[in-house]
Image: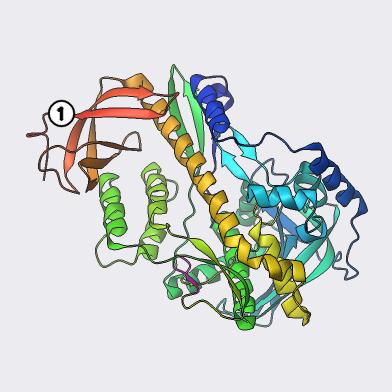
Amino acid sequence: MPDRRTSIAPSAAQTELARSLADLRASLDLPDGFAPPVEEEARRAAADQVLPEADLTAVPFLTIDPPGSTDLDQALHIERSGAGHRVRYAIADVPALVRPGGAVDEEARHRGQTLYAPDGRVPLHPAAIGEDAGSLLPDALRSAYVWDIVLDADGLEVSASVARARIRSRRQWTYAEAQEALDSGTAPEPLALLSEVGPARIAQERARGGASLNRPDEEIVFRDGAYAIERRATLPVEEWNAQLSLLTGMAAARVMLDAKVGILRTMPAPGAEAVEAFRAQTVALGLPWPQGVDYGEYLRTLDHGEQRAAAVLQAAAGLFRGAGYVAMDGEAPADPDQSAIAAPYAHTTAPLRRLVDRWALVVCDALCAGRPVPDWARESLGALPSIMGASNRLAAKLDAGALDRVEAALLASRIGAVFDATVLAVRNGTVTVQLADPVVTASLPRPDGVRPGDRLRLHLVAADIPSGTIRFDAVDPAGGVAR
């Protein structure tokens, strides 16, 4: 599932919010650059890389990414195969560039993943790997792990395997360019067939009971003395492209489960409290989730071009909690599923940006070739859940701190205003409320008798950008509650 990206527009780059976000980075002790030994080892690895003998450079792979992307993890090629399709999904060969136990490996294990904030990112690998030798840039000869997946006419997997090969991507498409080519009928066949495979995989997702959370990208702008968020709705091609990543992750999980060795991405089903909180948010945002409608089906009915729908998709992330990693070596987990996907799943398609994917690729490659899993990978599988857990906790702190500061910025020019809000949850003398405009979630002391689903009128007392704190008072708590 694609991650939402929030960025600061040039209009807001020198403002109080930008300074606050920089202070947040410092408070979390986020690294700024790489130590010289790490940079030097990365440069040597890039210069000394040996490409695999298997040659797929005749296959016209292509990439589809946001504008300006330089860390290109995946390239795709699709062709017809009988009544179905053959999907080849090339993944950056990061294992060939990172020596186990070396300086780059040690630093990557410390970081765990690329961290994203509105004012920039903290990369997992030095640029020599992440944006050059490891990146599947157009017209560059690269090594890749190429997944070869055959689908039937309904989009169901018939077979899947992975092996290393040298490739050359023909073109780096932006999402907008790819969508325009598809809409105008000028897309080359490997791209045009994505419009068949993508919807077929979405239909399979629906049949499984799964759901994709394709949250919109956001840009924070500063205009006429006030902050605002501009959201970009996802295009169909983005959702279809995301389905290829999901397909590959599910294939990798099956390969590892069959051998009972590897690492899975798992997530329990959401609890009743989380479901009811999200349902209340959909009501507050004016797009109520009907009773009796499956969660995934509800999300698929939303118009992603509408601002309220974009806010609902962001709120839906509240259900995607409790995700983690389970390593296995000789025994499969009792419940291997990722509940949102409604199937076993593994992170394997973003090794430039996520540490664990490097292990999944190496393990699956060995298993598909009938070779032993390399000792370094097998012996370190058990450490990955804690490494990734620590990295995810840091990412969550960064996300939460950035969101607090962005929400404070959105409200900073409206001190003294009164807002309508819906109560999402009540606990320990505090209520969590959802504003519809701007889309902000806040907490305040619980007014007497308030219950989830109640509507309140709130007076904005403070919105401090440096600390990211917001304070509301209820307007006439006794009379302001509407049921």
The magenta region covers 336-341
Residue 174 falls inside the magenta stretch: no
Mark 1 highlights which residue?
Answer: 475
Q: Is residue 1 left or right of residue 101?
A: left
Judge by depth and name the residue closer to the eye, 389 or 277: 389
Residue type pointed to by label 1: Val
Q: Is residue 152 visible?
A: no
Q: Is residue 65 left or right of residue 343?
A: right
Q: Which residue is found at the position 85% from the left and 46% from the top?
A: 41
Mark 1 crowd level (few <14, some 14–19, many ≥20, 10 Å Cα): some
Judge by depth and name the residue closer to the eye, 280 or 130: 130
Question: Residue 336's spot in the image, x, y percent?
Answer: 50, 74
Q: Which SS does the magenta portion mostly show?
A: loop
**Label 1: element kind:** loop
The image quadrant of residue 226 is top left
Q: Is residue 427 left or right of residue 10?
A: left
Question: Residue 297's spot in the image, x, y percent?
Answer: 38, 65
Q: Is residue 93 above or below residue 208?
A: above
Q: Is residue 95 above or below residue 438?
A: below
Q: Which residue is found at the position 85% from the left and 52% from the top?
A: 140
Q: Is residue 268 left or right of residue 471?
A: right
Q: Is the image coloured rainbow, by chain, by secondary structure, or in one colour? A: rainbow
Q: Is residue 324 above or below residue 139?
A: below
The image quadrant of residue 355 is bottom right
Question: Residue 244's spot in the image, x, y percent?
Answer: 61, 65
Question: Residue 365's spot in the image, x, y percent?
Answer: 75, 73
Q: Is residue 29 above or below residue 109?
A: above
Q: Is residue 357 visible?
A: yes
Q: Which residue is found at the position 41% from the left and 60% from the top?
A: 300
The image quadrant of residue 166 is bottom right
